[in-house]
Image (cartoon, helix red, strand yellow):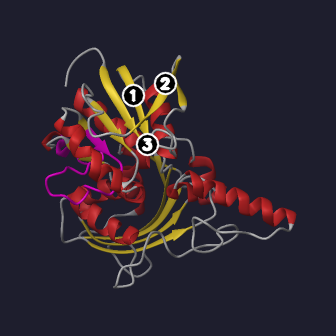
């Protein structure tokens, strides 16, 4: 890829990730020569603002990608499976935010700070990892490089925006109804999400784990290139609008002190340490939302395992967990 600007397409432009993608392309001055926006039939005809223009939203079609050089897909796995190969055949490099291709051995699964070299092995499609996996992996990568991760126990606390724009509206609607003393209705989630915690993200599998939990297992192993890492996941939906949090217990081959862990975290690009219990300072979704970096705090030694550490990681899943990571992959390729 070379040139003074690129023909870019955003698929799923009217969704939460798509809108964030447009913001980040603008903020980071990505060299866009032309921009085309795609969404479902019901959104076609809308106009979205980008820089100084109002651009029309087009319906998706297999022949819509002629001349497109970079295509960001954020429209769900079904749409990606249907249209991403056609975009790649038309000559575009597809950066896909869905789960459609993540575990395909022919498709790189990339976090630029962690495995940038994988991006250059693409055959037209590059997968963006699961948003919670990215937040978890940002602090795990420097530990893995230093002392090799053997086992991870991870419990996520995932914001409703991870389930899309309708989920955000459902939480708002339920809170408003509760304040007014009106009945609370559910559509997106299986139970009331306002003032509640749901120990389920995505559908259950036969073994009792959810699809989201197995994404953490499989994607972590693929990104770190180590099939022997043991991962025990639990994913939880919480009544927070934006930014996912993960409580992590990690066991490494060699001991890592808290002081060393802090140094490793602080030196890792895209990761910030916020960890001062004496001042009640630690990462929270409320303060991390809208930021690009992932934050880590509550760093402490495991009480019973010499090679164990506990920490708490928080990241904006619409930015680093999705849109920002996708744009960073594109930047890596054009650099």
Location of the C terminus by quadrant is top left
Q: Is residue 53 visible?
A: yes
Q: Is residue 108 magenta?
A: yes
Mark 2 or mark 3, which is nearer the start of the sequence? 3
Say if mark 3 contacts mark 2, CB within 8 Å.
Answer: no
Q: Secondary structure at mark 1?
A: strand
Marked residue nearer the N-terminal end (2 or 1):
1
Answer yes or no: do the residues labelled 2 and 1 have beta carbons within 8 Å? yes
For label 3, the SS is: loop
Q: Quadrant of residue 89?
A: top left
Residue 75 position, x and y percent, is 40, 48
Question: Total number of numbered labels?
Answer: 3
The kind of secondary structure element at disc 2 is: strand
The residue under label 3 is 12
Residue farthest along the bottom direction in this orientation: 207
Distance Cα–Cα, label 3 vs label 1: 11 Å
Q: Around disc 1, counting alpha carbons within 10 Å, would you say few (fewer than 14), some (14 to 19), or many (20 or more)?
A: some
The residue carrying mark 1 is 36
Q: Is residue 334 left or right of residue 75?
A: left
Residue at 65% x, 69% y is: 186
Q: Which residue does the image show at 44% across and 69% down from the upper left? A: 202
The residue to which callout 2 is attached is 55
Residue 293 colored in magenta in the image: no
Chain part drawn in magenta: 94-119
Which badge, 3 or 1, is on the more N-terminal residue?
3
Q: Position of residue 334 (x, y in %)?
A: 24, 27
In the depicted view, which residue is nearer to us: 330 or 231?
A: 330
Between 171 and 57, the one lying in front of the other is 57
Residue located farthest toward the right when viewing the structure as drawn: 180
């Amino acid at each position: 890829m070379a040139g003074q600007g690129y023909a870019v397409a955003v698929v799923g432009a009217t969704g939460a990730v798509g809108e964030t993608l447009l913001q980040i392309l603008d903020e980071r001055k990505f060299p866009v020569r032309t921009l085309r926006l795609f969404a479902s039939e019901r959104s076609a005809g809308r106009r979205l603002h980008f820089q100084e223009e109002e651009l029309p939203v087009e319906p998706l079609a297999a022949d819509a990608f002629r001349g497109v050089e970079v295509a960001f897909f954020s429209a769900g796995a079904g749409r990606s499976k249907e249209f991403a190969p056609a975009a790649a055949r038309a000559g575009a490099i597809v950066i896909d935010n869905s789960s459609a291709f993540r575990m395909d051995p022919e498709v790189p699964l990339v976090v630029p700070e962690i495995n940038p070299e994988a991006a250059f092995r693409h055959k037209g499609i590059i997968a963006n990892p699961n948003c919670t996996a990215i937040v978890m992996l940002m602090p795990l990568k420097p530990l893995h490089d230093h002392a090799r991760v053997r086992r991870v126990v991870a419990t996520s606390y995932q914001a409703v925006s991870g389930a899309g724009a309708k989920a955000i509206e459902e939480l708002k609607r339920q809170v408003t109804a509760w304040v007014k003393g009106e009945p609370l209705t559910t559509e997106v989630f299986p139970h009331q999400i306002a003032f509640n915690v749901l120990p389920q993200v995505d559908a259950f599998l036969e073994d009792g784990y959810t699809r989201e939990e197995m994404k953490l297992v499989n994607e972590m192993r693929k990104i770190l290139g180590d099939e022997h890492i043991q991962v025990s996941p639990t994913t939880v939906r919480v009544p927070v609008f934006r930014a996912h949090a993960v409580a992590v217990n990690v066991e490494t081959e060699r001991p890592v002190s808290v002081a060393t862990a802090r140094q490793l975290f602080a030196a890792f690009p895209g990761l910030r340490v916020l960890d001062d219990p004496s001042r009640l300072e630690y990462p929270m979704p409320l303060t991390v939302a809208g930021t690009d970096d992932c934050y880590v705090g509550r760093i402490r030694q495991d009480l019973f395992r010499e090679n164990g550490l506990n920490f708490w990681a928080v990241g904006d899943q619409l930015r680093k967990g999705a849109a920002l990571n996708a744009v960073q992959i594109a930047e890596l390729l054009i650099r």
